[in-house]
Image (cartoon, helix red, strand yellow):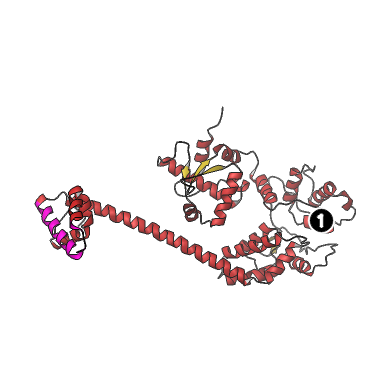
Amino acid sequence: MKLDSKNLVLNLLGTDANIQINKKILLTLKLEEAFFLSYLIDQYKYFEREGKLREDGSFYTSNMDIALYTTFNNSQIARVKKSGVEKGLFKISLEDSRTKSYYYLNFDKILEMIGTEKSNMELAYKSRFDSEKIDLEINNLEDIENLKKFTFNELRFYCKENKIKYSGNDKKDNLIKKIIENKNPNLISKSHFSTVNDISFTSEQKNRSLTKNGKLEDGVSDISLTVSEKSITNQEQINQEQNTCHVHEKNKKDEKIESIFHELGINYTDTNEASCLLILNEFEDNKILLEKYLLIIHKQLEKLTNIKNLAALFSKKLKEIDYSLINKIKKENKDNIEKILEEQKKIKDEERRIENSICMDKIIDNFLSLDKEIQENVVNLAEQKFLKENPQTNLDMFKAIKKRSYRSHLRMIYSKLLEIIKDENIKIGEVI
């Protein structure tokens, strides 16, 4: 029997008070994509609750709504929409001369992600390898040293995904050797395994760091982690590795900035930290703008060919601060803020207009409940005052509107009507 994927997904995700992101969806997709999908599900529930869904189950949302409620910029919106369509999570139909976007959610595909039998840990490691596009190439001793930077769990997951046999008793060095044997067995005799073995954790134990609050835990002796038998001529890279060869850090690094470097697959060294702090100062401590700057620089370097050491070149480019790029990013951010503020003002003005219109209708309703003679006297005085202040008014049109729609006529002279009501101290309901 086919599962009711739509109701299952809607019951599992989304509430009126907030947007929920399912953990399996978050680990399967990137954060932006997961948040955008959760936003669409939340919108679907809203339209369904209000009875505004179209017959085919689609609903409308604009890029401006998406920007307001997700804080995504235009490029982020375009990226998550394209990715979601490519992955079959939803379809988008452009209608009304391509000015409106209608969304069709693929609940079967979404439920497929939520209902996967893979554990959260498996999904997390898979996400890391996929997002960083890690394809381990073992061609020399330097590649082996890079391999040693992976954690025990990451190496074990890599073996599992690539069908490299391993046992529960294998330590980190054993896993590294098996990966080398699989990738390039000729390097086994040349490699030198001098790293401290990772502790092999059982399912009852939690993975813990060697350090905590600057102190070594569990009686582990002070260890200096050095790079062995490497032949590198690039001085920038040597400096980078020397900066990261200590367990004890002088100062705690900013976790947000460090996570950006981690996503780029580059070490957040002291040198890189110093450069980032200078750039961050130019952005007035706005880390979102700093992240944009770093991603642009990294993308520019990725397009270059014949780069032997991207990390070293990236570090060098950070030292050579690109002030023109900084100014461009700041201007774009200012423009985006102004656009958002302008849209927010439009929304508030519209809300105020609606409130005033509701209030006007209520006063007119109460006015129409008064004695006919009182109404006539007040209207006559209001008309005289209106025509005196607006002498250019077409009298024939003025009378025609009154004859055709008395309520529309009252709305036209409303401000003068209010003045007369207050001047004459006339009580109409609870409004005046």
Q: Is residue 270 above or below residue 303?
A: below
Q: Position of residue 320 (x, y in %)?
A: 68, 72
Which stretch appears magenta? 373-395
Residue at left offset 87%, top offset 49% = 185
Q: Residue 78, how many percent across, how many down?
A: 56, 52
Q: Which residue is mark 1?
A: 144
Residue 53 screen position, x and y as percent = 44, 40
Foreground of the two, 207 or 395: 395
Classify residue 365 as left or right of residue 244: left
Which amino acid, mark 1?
A: Ile
Instruction: Say if the magenta span includes residue 387.
Output: yes
Would you say residue 18 sits in the magenta stretch?
no
Q: Quadrant of the C terminus?
A: bottom left
Q: Nearer the viewer, residue 395 or 102?
A: 395
- Disc 1 element: helix
Rendered image quadrant of residue 49: top left
Q: Nearer the viewer, residue 98 or 200?
A: 98
Question: From this viewpoint, which residue is outermost toward the right?
Answer: 189
Q: Is residue 357 visible?
A: yes
> Residue 153, how many percent across, how many down?
72, 49
| Rendered residue at 61%/43% (across/down) | 87
Q: Quadrant of the N terminus?
A: top right
Q: Is residue 248 visible?
A: no
Binning the other alpha carbons within 10 Å of mark 1 as few (below 14), some (14 to 19) or many (20 upward) gives many
In the picture shown, does residue 391 fall above or below 357? Answer: below
Q: Main secondary structure of the magenta part?
A: helix
